[in-house]
Image (spheres, coloured by chain):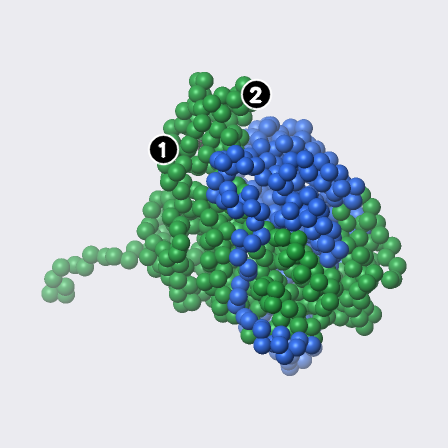
Amino acid sequence: MSETPLLDELEKGQWPSFVSEIKKSAKKNKKAEGLLGQLELSYKEKKTHWKHGGIVGVRGYGGGVIGRFSDVGEEFPGAAHFHTIRVNQTAGFFYTAEALRKICDIWDRHGSGLTNLHGSTGDLVLLGADTDSLEDIFCELSKEGWDLGGSGGGVRTPSCCVGPARCEFSCYDTLALNQDITMTYQDELHRPSFAYKWKFKFSGCPNDCVAAIARSDFAVIGTWRDDIQIDQDAAAEYVQNGLDIQTDLLAKCPTRCIEWDGSLRINNPDCTKCMHCINVMPKALRPGKDKGACILMGAKAPIVQGALLASVIVPFIRLQPPYDEIKGIIKKIWEFWDENGVARERIGECIQRVGLGNFLEAIGVEISPQVVTQPRDNPYIFYEEYYEEEGGEG
Amino acid sequence: MATLEELKARKTDIGPPPVEKFLHSIIKENYGKWRYHEILKSGVLAHTAESGAVIYTVRAASPRLISTDFIRYICDLAEKYCDGYLRFTSRNNVEFLLANKDNIEPLIGELENNGIPVGGTGRSISNIVHTQGWVHCHSAATDASGLVKVVMDELIDHFKNEDLPAKLRIAVACCLNMCGAVHCSDIAILGLHRTVPKIDNERLPKICEIPSTVASCPNAAIRPTFIDGKKSVKIDEDRCMYCGNCYTVCPAMPIADPLNDGVSIWVGGKVANTRQGPSFTKLAIPFLPNNPPRWPEVTSAIKNIVEVYARNGKKYERMAEWIDRIGWTKFFSLTGIQFTKYHIDDFKHAGLSYRRTTQMRS
Ligand code: SF4
Ligand code: SF4
Ligand code: SF4
Ligand code: SF4
């Protein structure tokens, strides 16, 4: 292995070191060795040495593999081809040791031995494959029951929070919906044909642990409509154990709708389901029983027209298999996008361009005050209806 | 090469395996029937089901860019202490799922002896979500893994201990594409370019489509032109804000500039709908130099912001809520960060952030 004085500095300190990880692989793997050398050069020159992505892939798929070529491949042959393989992760990122080891075996045989668990979108990422080994890797992964994730202008690999598998707050089955949506849209996931990327993210409650509201074109965030469930004994126990209920709970409720006089009283019609009180005393408070989710759309990072948070499209929807209602909405939205979208414009930008009101009307979703924080404050209204003067030209 | 048999077995669109087979029996039996959870100590959760069953979770750090050796090692631990079951969090922590409470301490002992800290729960700093950087991306203005490493080395005590007013979420992205959720984090570290893309007039006509290159610019800075009789583009330098979008569309417009690329720091973003709801990050420090391998300017800037927040924030107050309470003027004076003209928005909806009232703290 070549000398890496700069990267060696990143093996110091208490946080586990990615440089040590690259070195572990580099000891036995030429590709990882190439990466190590190239990265040291980048650290020296303060500059990336990856070329613009190239198109590579496996038969029958339009995405899931992202080409990555080095601009110093002659100097570091191992890094010359260093493609990414996105493997569709399990719902909620649950694994067994046995299953992960099999992926490691395949990856040690054919790739760099380096991975990301997980990529930003959620995929289990294998980092550093040669063009020639892609088919083999795919075949072996497929034999073990794994498939590719998404890339390009199509559905990206959906991801969800831990949900009902290990969280008492979950208002719908995030893992089941995530799996159902992933399976229903395999074609859109593997053969991208949209104007730009489309991300689905599923969070079980307004805590939004997968950052759906910030990072997905289509965010499904669990919520409820009835009263917060209260266990008064457990609430009293929190207070006895030293919880400063006035400061830490009552004063932090955004609508000041909770009171405490030895027992908790919530004025539920004023509750915005923000989760604060429930997070503070999970043993005493739980979401209501009339559970479902809110659908929000259009979050994205700044490129191209500026960053957006997702905004409410459907304030409340019940989610039970076979999920026909939500799939009906998705179908209408994609039809709309197909007609109105332009290349490299995310759906959030598209909705802003045509107007949320027009968008909701086009997809047949009821227009309610819940989709805005306030009515417009400018008078530039595009009226679509007029009175005609009776009698005409007469 | 794949054998004929393998090629025949090759199936497409099978999707991810159903999650059921990766769930511990305690989780399967109590799926959707969890009653409450407690944080037993930093990095250790106990979830109790209505049935009274309990599943314990030990949350451990990971550099995210990991070798198969690392994966095999955590798999060994999962088999030794967790009946083989483990998961990852959306912030790339490893979570070991234990049925037996007595296994918690031995597991933590082994992890810590092997340099893998345990923590990241409750009112602490969890793992930093980040992007590829120089390790694996063409548009990187800085390295992401390196920044994460040096910042977490500096803040490790806040990962191991729940000693902050509220949870603190940090994210790193190495260019404005922001493959991580940095636009909504308590603290965001964002790599950026500061100079106009250099146009390779030789290659451009061969590899780029002129109309899509022109259309790629959010600020209409790119115009078609002819150079030596060949089609190319030119950039109106006054309109360019170095976003690199044209480079994504056209590889003949490289934007990397080692002398000028660097890092900016943003604060006060939030994803959760708790209390005042989600918000974007706002600019704290417009530029810090790329100073690898350990970015001392960046680590000390982040450390300063975190420590000021730790001292002044009230319990359950996220960074955004703390700044809201004290006001931005106080934020800049407490942190000693200089407020400059770059902090004042001059893009599309700039006016929305101008102060449109006489109400202000002195
Ligand atoms: S989003 Fe809500 S339901 Fe999902 S893991 Fe987080 S707290 Fe639990
Ligand atoms: S969920 Fe939020 S809004 Fe509702 S009562 Fe609790 S703190 Fe108040
Ligand atoms: S943030 Fe930019 S540089 Fe970093 S991985 Fe994403 S596209 Fe690449
Ligand atoms: S870097 Fe961005 S602003 Fe500058 S010319 Fe390219 S697309 Fe336009």
Which chain can be seen in blue?
B
Please determine whether, in this image, residue A272 is positioned above or below residue B214.
above
Q: Which residue is mark 2?
A: A241
Residue pictured at 49% horizontal, 36% vertical: B51
Q: Quadrant of ligand 2?
A: top left
Please determine whether, in this image, residue B17 is positioned above or below residue A220.
below
Task: Tell me the shade of chain A.
Answer: green
Q: Nearer the viewer, residue A147 or A263?
A: A147
Q: Is residue A1 visible?
A: yes
Residue pictured at 71% horizontal, 63% vertical: A105
Determine whether, in the image, residue A391 is placed left or right of residue B313.
Answer: left
Q: Nearer the viewer, residue A141 or B6?
A: B6
Q: Residues within 10 Å of mark 1 (few under 14, many from 20)?
A: few
Q: Is residue A43 visible?
A: no
Q: Secondary structure at mark 1?
A: helix
Q: Which residue is mark 1?
A: A269
Q: Quadrant of residue A79?
A: bottom right
Residue pictured at 49% horizontal, 54% vertical: A178
Quarter of the picture containing the N terminus of chain A is: bottom right
C-alpha separation, residue under disc 2 versus residue under disc 1: 30 Å
Evaluate if marks 2 and 1 touch, with contact meaning CB atoms under 8 Å apart. no
Q: Return the x and y of residue B18 as percentages of the image width and height.
A: 53, 57
Quarter of the picture containing the C terminus of chain A is: bottom left
Determine whether, in the image, residue A161 is placed left or right of residue A290.
Answer: right
Please determine whether, in this image, residue B108 is positioned above or below residue A40.
above
